[in-house]
Amino acid sequence: MTIETGLAPARVDGLLALKGVIVQDDSFGGDQPTRAARDASILETLAIAFDSLARSRRSEGLKLAGVLSRTADEIGRLTEDAVHTAAAQPAAIREKLHAQLNDLLAQASPGDERIVQEIALLAARADVREELDRLRAHVEEAHLLIASGESVGRKLDFLSQELNREANTLCAKSADIALTRIGLALKAAVDQFREQAQNVE
């Protein structure tokens, strides 16, 4: 059975503040010089531990920066591969347009607006220059952030989202299998970049 008192539940800090709950024995550890030596030893040990932690974090940060930089290089290499593959696309697109135009002409009357719309739509879908330009810019920005030595975890995470968006669009616009393969490889590299970026402060 519980009794309602109207009082707030007891809190830990309130209990610890009560007289006699915690008693500090000033006599523990010997006289004043002994305690001072002990305190100095504790502080020295803490300083050594913090220095070791700082060295370990620096070492881990350098290794992580190397991994991120290599992954960014891979994204850059794949982007250049995509540039060269996309440069070969106009001929394939031209052939496809001719074939589709012949089909449309067989079905439509001269001056049909649908022909113009189809041509414009195919041309817009096939143009991946903007995506490739943005991928190049993002790779350059990634290298700058990695080299800055600052806390760039959130910026790298955002940048990885942008890289992923461009890789997705590249795959969606791709008109041939070679460019699609490069786009998929790009997506895999961007995923690796994002996973590593999540370890950065």
Image (tube, rainbow, N blue to C red):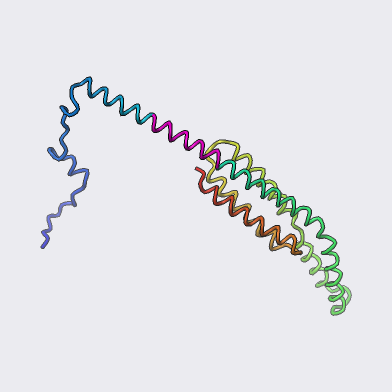
What percent of the width, then of the height, locates residue 114?
80, 72
Based on the displayed image, in which of its 4 quarters is residue 65 positioned?
top right
Q: Is residue 143 above or below residue 93?
A: above
User: In the picture provided, is 99 more to the left or to the right than 58?
Assistant: right
The correct choice, above or below, for 173 with respect to 42 in the image is below
Residue at image position (39%, 29%) is 48
Left or right for 22, reference 114: left
Question: What residue span does the magenta drawing correspond to?
Answer: 48-63
- The foreground one among 79 and 12 is 79
**Quadrant of image for the N terminus:** bottom left
Which residue corresponds to the image point at 52% horizontal and 44% vertical from the top-left?
A: 200
Residue 134, horizontal then vertical, whole percent: 69, 50
* Residue 6 picture quarter: bottom left
User: Farthest bottom residue?
Assistant: 107
Of 125 and 175, nearer the camera is 175
Q: Is residue 68 left or right of residue 84?
A: left
Q: Quadrant of residue 64?
A: top right
Q: Is residue 141 visible?
A: yes
Query: For the point 67% across and 46% down, which residue is it?
Result: 73
Does the magenta segment cover residue 60? yes
